[in-house]
Image: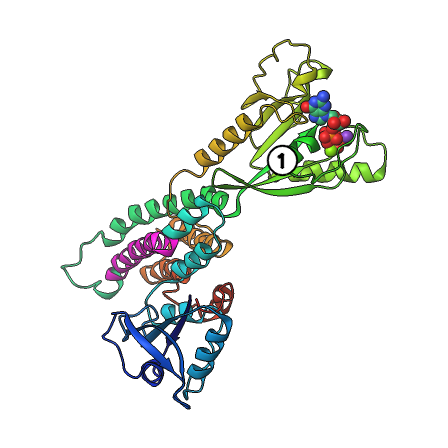
Amino acid sequence: MAVLRLSGPQAGVALTALAGRLPEPRRAQLARLRDPATGEVLDQGLALWFPGPRSATGEDMAELQIHGGRAVVAAVLGAVLTVPGLRPAEAGEFTRRAFLNGRMDLTEAEGLADLIAAETQAQRRLAFAHAFGHLGQQVEAWRGRLIRAMALVEAGIDFADEDDVPAGARALAKPEVAALLEELTAALADRRGALVREGALIAIAGLPNAGKSSLLNALARREVAIVSDEPGTTRDLLEVALDLDGHKATLVDTAGLREAESRVEAEGIRRARARMAQADLVLWVHDLSDGPAPAEPPVAAEAPLWLLGNKVDRAAGLPAPVRSWAGHQLTLSAARGEGLEELTGALSRFIAERAAGEHPALLRARHRASAEEARAQIAHALAQWDRLDDELLAEELRLAARALGRMTGAIGVEDLLDVVFREFCIGK
Ligand SMILES: Nc1nc2c(ncn2[C@@H]2O[C@H](COP(=O)(O)OP(=O)(O)OP(=O)(O)O)[C@@H](O)[C@H]2O)c(=O)[nH]1
Ligand SMILES: [K+]
Ligand SMILES: [Mg+2]
């Protein structure tokens, strides 16, 4: 089946030209679709009519559900395009019109783009929450509170000589603005949304020959990396995308850490350390046939460090001693595929805990930039609170509110629209 969507003032004319008449609004109607020029029947399908403004785009809209074959679609599309005023939609144009007609805010449009692109169930849940307004509502609530605070401060400007304005209007606004600063700071510190959207970055690290590449291949279920008994085999970073029980993750294999024997190896080790510094989790692979894992943390990592005792098939049967530096400890055999289920289970629980809750997160760089601008502006206003006169203080708060308004598209976003809607495919 194929769906043809028409939007704009000529949608009704086009629908009548093909289906013979307009169906009742919002009711599917069986219809023979004819070429308006020749009268030839092109297909039989369902016709729907959504008069604006109660439609997805806010404009008059028509929908034709037709048989999906290529020739049918080409014929019906060709016939529709003979109606004057109709042209093929650009990518994202339906959503863009919905935004311009006030049917959704900008964060919802972005959420919709994410929903369409979602690969894992966690991404789908988060995108759905965004597409249906969670972040937009949160940001509008923040903006509303700023505007109220601004009004209190301005009350001092406009009615300074009147008696009925509470003397401490400005003092009343201050704690409210301070609370906002705290909330914005917390939202900016929260990386949970990004973890779901972009996925967790998991670095595999260890000494040469520990079995890092073997582990990458076992988890990826394909021969991504070269495995050999030669220490120093891996130099470049090798990345694999995984879906861990609905959570997106990127697994990175790195060069074994040691005194490098060549410039190329040294560069590999430098890259390994740099990637580890960005990771959400570092898996330290230790070769159990070399004896117990070190008692001290083998690398300095900001992210949690797990200890994976590998080659358990070659270990002498002694239990691996517990290491306090390890956030989690497992034994496995990458070569034989032992202990891998336990590892993937632990990894998916780790991500799930970090990403907990479908909450209004600042997902994109654009959101973070707006929130950061608002936060800085508010911090500045608070620092100057008692020094600035009412007018200047109100202006500071207005600038902060503007920054938040740009996030939902409530104000001043013409320059952003191309960037946001470029991500969509045609027909959305
Ligand atoms: N017996 C046994 N051998 C393993 C296991 N895992 C890996 N090996 C072997 O250990 C050797 C090194 O494995 P690699 O996966 O290349 O190790 P690496 O950590 O990636 O090594 P570099 O890239 O050189 O740092 C290979 O000969 C593997 O076959 C295991 O679980 N058991
Ligand atoms: K190796
Ligand atoms: Mg390797």
Q: Quadrant of residue 212?
A: top right
> Quick one: quadrant of the N terminus?
bottom left
Question: Residue at left 34%, top 82%?
Answer: 9
**Residue 77 on the magenta segment:** no
- Residue 213 in picture, x, y percent from top left: 70, 33
54 with respect to 73 (left or right): left
Query: How many other residues sit within 10 Å of disc 1, few (<14), some (14-19) or many (≥20)?
Result: many
The residue stretch that appears in magenta: 130-155
Q: Quadrant of residue 264?
A: top right
Q: How is the image coloured?
A: rainbow
Tell me where residue 2 appears, x and y as whole percent: 43, 68
Residue 69 placement (x, y as % from top left): 48, 69
Give the amino acid at mark 1. Answer: Ala
Identify the residue at the far left of this view. Answer: 164
379 displayed left or right of 30: right
Tell me the quadrant of the picture where the C terminus can be found.
bottom left
